[in-house]
Image: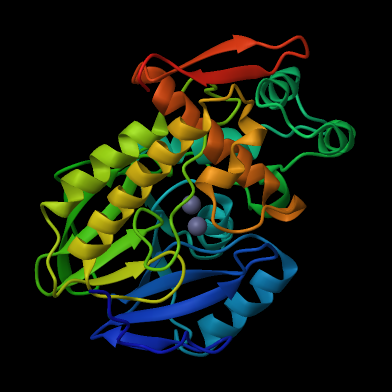
């Protein structure tokens, strides 16, 4: 069972102390998922910050408020990144520039963050267009996106300089008066960091495990044949062997919760269920953009179309790798997917 010890998030510019020396802060995001959680670990004369929000004028103003307010004007000595997504890395470079803070991350997170911030694209690349065509993107949305500036990390992330400290599976990190075991997840983002306290029951989970939403598992033009769902399922099963009912899970979004073993089981079952519904849906050949209904319980509008598409491709690639689906090119370049044999 999942329980939420706190009914709601901290107010803007304020913090909630979740455990001794562990503060919960929240920053807004200008998207459907409208917030990100940030955790501040008390180091006595400074703070270790876990994740940072996107880089924007509004974020800077809120960070100033938080640094002067709940963080009591003490400097940030370390920034830990759970994974490379902009809502987590956006303000890392800003905090580093301001305080000379050390950056800690997994190697893949750091490389992805640095590469994607530097890789500015005024228009979608040929590879992105080919990827969208392969997925059978809605013609109107395709025509519009082709002429628009795409989602660029540089627009919402402060630059990150070279120089970081690598965290890897099996490391033990000291922060906030606790020793934390490093366990690496995958699927939502490659080499996603999770931290498990040895001294109490806290787990810093980033977006690897979230209570009330299923983390997006997406395939992108950088690696169009990837099977992140397989890595995701492996991570959930592995982390479940570590999970305890008394763990208090501090995620990148939504509320802190207990019931981690249950939640991991639920996430695994949800994805297996989605795969079965998708396999049945492929009794008739379909392109990826025609496969939203069996995967998502909510309406897919233009705001969530991109995320839905990359997640659908992830499920299709997984069935393909498992030999359960095959595909052929339609005339317009889209992959037409169908079940193989008995599915
Ligand atoms: Zn994420
Ligand atoms: Zn996130």
The answer to whether 265 appears left or right of 13 in the picture is: left
Instruction: Determine the residue positioned at 30% across, 87% down.
Output: 5
Instruction: Determine the residue positioned at 71% across, 64% down.
Output: 56
The answer to whether 281 appears left or right of 242 in the picture is: right
The picture places residue 279, in percent across and down from the top left corner, at 44, 31
Give the quarter of the figure containing the C terminus.
Answer: top left
Residue 114, visible in the rendered structure: no
Residue 211, visible in the rendered structure: yes
The answer to whether 275 appears left or right of 134 in the picture is: left
The picture places residue 84, in percent across and down from the top left corner, at 48, 46
Instruction: Determine the residue positioned at 51% across, 25% down.
Output: 283
The picture places residue 149, in percent across and down from the top left corner, at 83, 39
The answer to whether 181 appears left or right of 276 in the picture is: left
* Residue in front for this viewpoint, 185 or 289: 289
Q: Quadrant of residue 153?
A: top right
Q: Quadrant of residue 4?
A: bottom left
């Amino acid at each position: 069972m999942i329980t939420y010890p706190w009914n709601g998030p901290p107010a803007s510019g304020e913090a909630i102390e979740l455990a001794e020396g562990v503060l919960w802060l929240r920053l807004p995001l200008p998207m459907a998922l409208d917030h990100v959680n940030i955790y501040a670990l008390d180091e006595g004369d400074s703070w270790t910050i876990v994740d940072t929000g996107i880089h924007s004028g509004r974020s800077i103003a809120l960070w100033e408020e938080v640094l002067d307010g709940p963080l009591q004007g003490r400097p940030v000595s370390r920034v830990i990144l759970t994974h490379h997504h902009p809502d987590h890395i956006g303000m890392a470079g800003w905090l580093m520039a301001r305080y000379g803070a050390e950056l800690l991350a997994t190697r893949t997170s750091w490389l992805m963050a640095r590469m994607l911030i530097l890789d500015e694209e005024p228009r979608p690349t040929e590879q992105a267009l080919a990827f969208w065509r392969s997925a059978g993107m809605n013609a109107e949305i395709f025509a519009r996106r082709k002429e628009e500036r795409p989602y660029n990390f540089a627009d919402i992330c402060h630059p990150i300089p070279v120089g970081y400290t690598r965290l890897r599976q099996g490391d033990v990190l000291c922060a906030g008066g606790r020793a934390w075991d490093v366990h690496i997840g995958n699927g939502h983002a490659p080499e996603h960091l999770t931290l498990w306290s040895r001294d109490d029951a806290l787990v810093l989970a980033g977006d690897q495990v979230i209570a009330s939403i299923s983390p997006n598992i997406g395939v992108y033009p950088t690696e169009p044949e990837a099977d992140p769902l397989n890595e995701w399922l492996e991570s959930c099963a592995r982390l479940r062997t570590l999970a305890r009912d008394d763990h208090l899970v501090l995620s990148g979004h939504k509320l802190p919760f207990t019931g981690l073993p249950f939640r991991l089981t639920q996430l695994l079952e949800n994805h297996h269920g989605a795969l079965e519904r998708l396999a049945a849906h492929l009794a008739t050949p379909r392109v990826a953009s025609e496969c939203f209904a069996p995967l998502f319980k909510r309406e897919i509008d233009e705001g969530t179309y991109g995320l839905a598409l990359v997640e659908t491709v992830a499920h299709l690639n997984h069935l393909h790798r498992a030999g359960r689906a095959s595909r052929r090119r339609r005339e317009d370049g889209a992959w037409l997917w169908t079940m193989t044999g008995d599915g």
